[in-house]
Image (cartoon, helix red, strand yellow):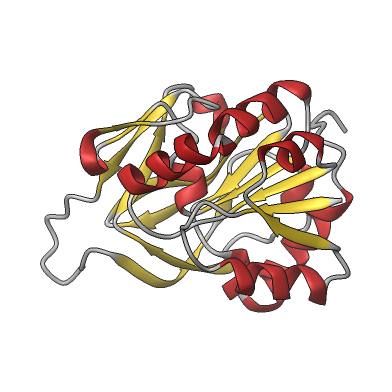
Amino acid sequence: MTVIVDYDAGNLRSVERACREVGLDADITNDPGRVRGAERIIFPGVGAAGSAMRSLARSGVGAALVDAFHAGTPILGICLGLQISLDRSEENDTETLGLVSGDVRRFRLDDPSLKVPHMGWNAVNLRRPHPVLDGIQPGDEFYFVHAYRPVPANTADVIAESTYEGVFCSVLGRDNYVATQFHPEKSGRVGLRLLERFAAWNGRVDA
């Protein structure tokens, strides 16, 4: 069973509908036991890092996610789910889960024509292959809504990048964890194809 993690961070039904559309049976849960026992996990979210981490700590789901990661369960982070998977976020000066080393920083833009949050369609360009992004073509566009960007400590954890004034990491991953700053569930056909590949992924990145 695939679970969609509920930690009071919104947009869960849209993720559930997108999973259903690609034939992925996924249940929404905030039960730490179900998270630990899941075959695969989707960790979406919108909102603020501080309140998200308080919710994860209160429910015990944060610890369950860390346990599932170390157990090798395939995990897909989305948007806020990606951001709170690193070590620390500038948003609310929050210590986060630490699945991938690095931090999260607010966009600071010099170009007055660009606004924060970064919102809308943007191209995603692969830096290295990954099974969940297999078939993504250079310039394929996905839907973004975010004011903060991930900065992995290890460049080897960067899977894909996008540009908003400067280049930023838009997909990261390590071992059985992969995460997108964009919303695949809001990205039309190309986003659904990504969810299909996640549904078939065994958590390995070696061919």
Q: Nearer the viewer, residue 67 or 198?
A: 67
Image point (83%, 28%), residue name: 206
Towards the viewer: 75 or 130? 75
- Residue at 54% over, 34% down: 62
Q: Is residue 124 left or right of residue 201?
A: left
Counting from the top left corner in percent of width and height, residue 157 is at: 56, 29
Q: Nearer the viewer, residue 98 or 118?
A: 98
* Displayed quadrant of residue 90: top left
Is 179 on the left-hand or right-hand side of 46? Answer: right
Quarter placement of the C terminus:
top right
Residue 144 percent coordinates (x, y): 44, 66
Q: Residue 102, image x and y in percent? A: 41, 26
What is the total number of numbered labels drawn onto the structure image? 0
Image height of 169 relative to 177, above or below: below
Query: Which residue lies at the image location 81% right of the left edge and 36% below the top edge?
Result: 37
Q: Is residue 161 visible?
A: no
Asked if 174 appears above or below 53 in the picture, the reply is above
Task: Name the side, left or right, on which 154 lies relative to 66.
Answer: left
